Amino acid sequence: MPNIKSQSKRAMTNAKRNAALSSQKSELKTAIKAVLKAVEANDKATATAAYNNAASLLDKAVTSHMKHGNYVSRQKARLQTAINKIA
């Protein structure tokens, strides 16, 4: 338990930020899985729509320093390659 008032305030801020970050990470993972699921079903239209959503979330993850730029580039390329393989 913090003894200093500013430490207890900081602990509360950290808890709120951790909850928000966990929610954003979960949303991002779900968006990526939606693309892969659509690719598995060979549904190019749904996969493209899901990719657009996932790419947007990935780009936001870079600007908020949640994910590294190289990670985002790799994921976007991987998803786009999977979509392009659909006949």
Image: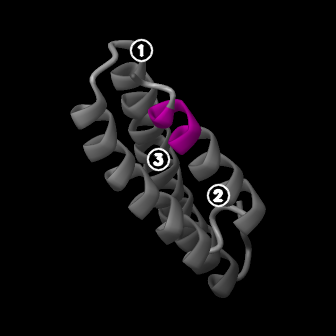
Say if 76 sits above or below 70 in the image: above
Q: Residues within 10 Å of mark 2 (few under 14, many from 20)?
A: some
In percent of the image, x 65 and y 73: which residue is there? 65
Kindly state the secondary structure of the residue where label 1 is placed.
helix
Q: Residues within 10 Å of mark 3 (few under 14, many from 20)?
A: many
Measured as percent of width and height from the top left, residue 83 is found at: 45, 34
Q: Which residue is mark 2?
A: 72
Q: Residues within 10 Å of mark 1 (few under 14, many from 20)?
A: some
Measured as percent of width and height from the top left, residue 41 is found at: 33, 13
Q: Which residue is mark 1?
A: 40
Say if 56 sits above or below 23 in the image: below
Quarter-wise, where is residue 24 in the image? bottom left
Q: Which residues are magenta?
A: 79-84
In percent of the image, x 52 and y 44: which residue is there? 80
Q: Earlier in the sequence, mark 1 or mark 2?
A: 1
**On the picture, is 12 further left or further right than 46?**
right
Q: Which residue is mark 3?
A: 28
Mark 3 or 2, closer to the camera: 2
Q: Earlier in the sequence, mark 1 or mark 3?
A: 3
Query: 86 and 36: which one is in front?
Result: 86
Q: Amino acid at mark 1?
A: Glu
- Main secondary structure found in the magenta portion: helix
